[in-house]
Amino acid sequence: MPPSTARLWRDPQLPFVESRRASDSLACYRPHSHSTWSIGVVDRGHSDFRCPGAGRILTPGTLISIPAWLPHSCNPLPGRAWGYQMLYVDVAWMRRWAGPLPTAVQVGEDPDAYERFQRLNDCLFSGRPARHKAAALAAFLSRGDWRGDPVVGPPPAAPELEPVRRWLAEPLAEAPSLPALAARLGLSRYQLIRRFQGATGMTPHAYRLDRRIDRARALLRQGADLTRVAHDLGFADQSHFQRAFKERVAMTPGFYRRPR
């Protein structure tokens, strides 16, 4: 996606929140997840939202809240551009101000809530002091404007797959091969893939790549070198890293590392 269509805000004084604005965007996302809580609005056009077990077309003025680690994608309708805004909030910080968090995706169409989200993001992208921005975010979360009607919850729990999740979720470690993971559970390779995808919404390969990209975002926010990040996270080369990153973040690693 050309950098001119996207703006990214973050502040080292406020490490618990990041915000994005995109206009006239044609960029498409692969299914992905975040370690943060995601809250977004559609400004223009329509978005095809999908997550395990559900799909919905989001219209202008719609607000959506997505739990951490829930695989999802939000893309424009074929051949059409859209505009949107997204907040990514640390789960612990969000829970501090919002209380118990839902497990389901929630969608709301309250014009007042949309307007308050706009004002919050205007504040975050402004030159106001960090303490004012933190107070505005805390007030928004406390008020509960991000809440809406439940759309879908997380995939069914599968405790027997927890060891596989742990093996795949550590991006800096060498994960066992898929046949080795399957053998530990007494499954065939294809049985493991089907069960894992049913429980997480992703294949084991996509799940591991998703965790690598999330880790890459954390390292890039700290100013880490692009080549070092790609190498340490096990990507074949820089182009492989850049391609996988853009498919899930809709911007290059370099632009994400130093947003304009």
Image (tube, rainbow, N blue to C red):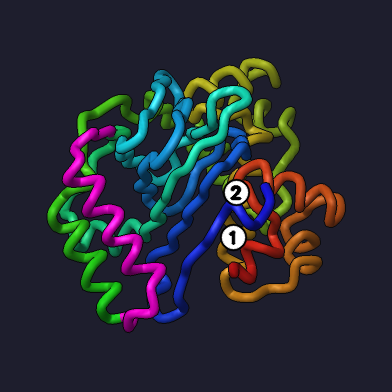
Residue 113 magenta-highlighted: yes
> In the image, is residue 197 above or below residue 260?
above
- Residue 56 visible somewhere in the drawing: yes
- Say whether marks 2 and 1 touch (CB < 8 Å): yes
Q: Amino acid at mark 1?
A: Arg
Where residue 120 sits in the image (x, y, percent)?
Answer: 28, 61
Which circle marks residue 249 in the picture? 2
- Looking at the rendered structure, the secondary structure element under dot 1 is helix
Q: Main SS of the magenta segment?
A: helix
- On screen, residue 167 versus residue 145, left or right, reads right
Residue under the image location 65 percent in, 57 percent down:
3
Where residue 139 sits in the image (x, y, percent)?
Answer: 17, 63
- On screen, residue 71 versus residue 167, left or right, reads left
Residue under label 1: 217
- Residue 186 visible somewhere in the drawing: no
Where residue 164 sits in the image (x, y, percent)?
Answer: 57, 37
Start and end of the magenta stretch?
107-130
